[in-house]
Image: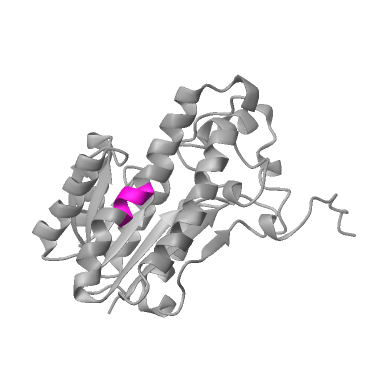
């Protein structure tokens, strides 16, 4: 019996990477999953993979940063599954690595719209359904870039710091409702968003150096973040609320250092 058996879940950004991994894992653990992504073809492929593995899933194309579309995907899940128990608000954009003083207000507005306002809208529209039943779990994908500088571009980092604050303030605002709100903070994970970095390293022959700055000495994979999201969504995390869980190989736990070779 899976840890999410009987639960009704939404995963945004489910067309690839962490979102797809979460949708597949949540479904394998018994949840009915609405996979949401603005790429209709990609999210349809995620649904097909869930169904092929014996799970239950629906797919929907939506822009998570548009309120009408956020309200629509929440209602779609409620209508399809009869309720809502879990949301993994994972959709996000990187904004690239434009230097701070060269970035435009338009770039910042778009990154904040998708990454931060998108997470807010997921909470805004999902939490009332959960509060009405006295139970629910919302997991937002933040980032170690929201904890420390130099992990990503400035706009992305600021948006993810906002997500961390959002889950704290949302957890406080929803006190007594039975709805928990937490964040997972990935480190360097190989996804579609980070693929250019990985491709460039492989072209240089330096793939083995990716992730060398953290104690684990490697980069992470989407399924490792999905596992953390599953924990936060499950009853195993029933006393975890308003927290930002770093899943980064230890990177955010330390100051930079030069690794001495093992002898």
Where is the C terminus found, in terms of image quarters? bottom right
Q: Which quadrant of the view contains residue 140? A: bottom left
Judge from the rendering whether residue 222 lies leftward or rightward of residue 220; answer left or right: left
Decide if residue 44 is in sight here: no
Q: Position of residue 25 (x, y in %)?
A: 34, 62
Decide if residue 137 is in sight here: yes
Q: Position of residue 83 (x, y in %)?
A: 15, 66
Is residue 11 shown above or below 168?
above
Residue in the picture at 64% in, 32% down: 201
Dominant secondary structure, magenta: helix
Judge from the rendering whether residue 79 lies leftward or rightward of residue 46; answer left or right: left
Q: How many marks?
A: 0
Q: What is the image's colouring?
A: one colour
Judge from the rendering whether residue 236 lies leftward or rightward of residue 217; answer left or right: left
Is residue 162 shown above or below 225?
above
Q: Is 166 covered by the magenta stretch?
A: no
Q: Which quadrant of the view contains residue 106? A: top left
Residue placed most toward the observer, 150 or 224: 150
Judge from the rendering whether residue 207 lies leftward or rightward of residue 159; answer left or right: right
Residue placed most toward the observer, 239 or 260: 239
Which residue is farthest front?
173
Where is the N terminus found, in terms of image quarters? bottom left
Is residue 210 shown above or below 216?
above
Q: Position of residue 118 (x, y in %)?
A: 35, 44
Q: Position of residue 225 (x, y in %)?
A: 48, 57
The residue segment tinted magenta is 119-123
Residue in the picture at 46% in, 74% down: 240
């Amino acid at each position: 019996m899976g840890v999410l058996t009987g639960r009704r879940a939404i995963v945004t950004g489910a067309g690839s990477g962490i979102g797809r991994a979460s949708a597949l894992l949540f479904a394998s653990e018994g949840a009915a999953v609405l996979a949401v992504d603005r790429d209709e073809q990609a999210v349809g492929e995620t649904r097909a993979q869930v169904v092929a593995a014996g799970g239950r899933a629906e797919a929907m194309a939506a822009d998570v940063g548009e309120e009408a579309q956020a309200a629509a995907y929440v209602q779609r899940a409620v209508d399809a599954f009869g309720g809502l128990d879990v949301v993994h608000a994972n959709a996000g954009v990187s904004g690239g690595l434009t230097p701070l003083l060269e970035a435009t207000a338009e770039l910042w507005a778009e990154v904040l719209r998708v990454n931060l306002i998108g997470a807010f809208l997921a909470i805004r529209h999902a939490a009332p359904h959960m509060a009405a039943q006295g139970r629910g779990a919302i997991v937002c994908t933040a980032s170690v870039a929201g904890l420390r500088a130099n992990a990503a571009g400035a706009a992305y980092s600021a948006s993810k710091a906002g997500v961390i604050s959002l889950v704290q303030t949302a957890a406080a605002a929803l006190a007594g409702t039975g709805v928990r709100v937490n964040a997972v903070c990935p480190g360097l994970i190989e996804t579609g968003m980070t693929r250019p970095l990985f491709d460039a390293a492989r072209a240089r022959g330096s793939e083995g150096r990716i992730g060398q700055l953290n104690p684990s000495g490697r980069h992470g994979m989407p399924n490792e973040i999905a596992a953390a999201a599953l924990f936060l969504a499950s009853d195993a995390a029933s006393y975890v609320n308003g927290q930002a869980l770093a899943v980064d190989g230890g990177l955010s736990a330390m100051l930079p250092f030069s690794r001495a070779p093992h002898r």
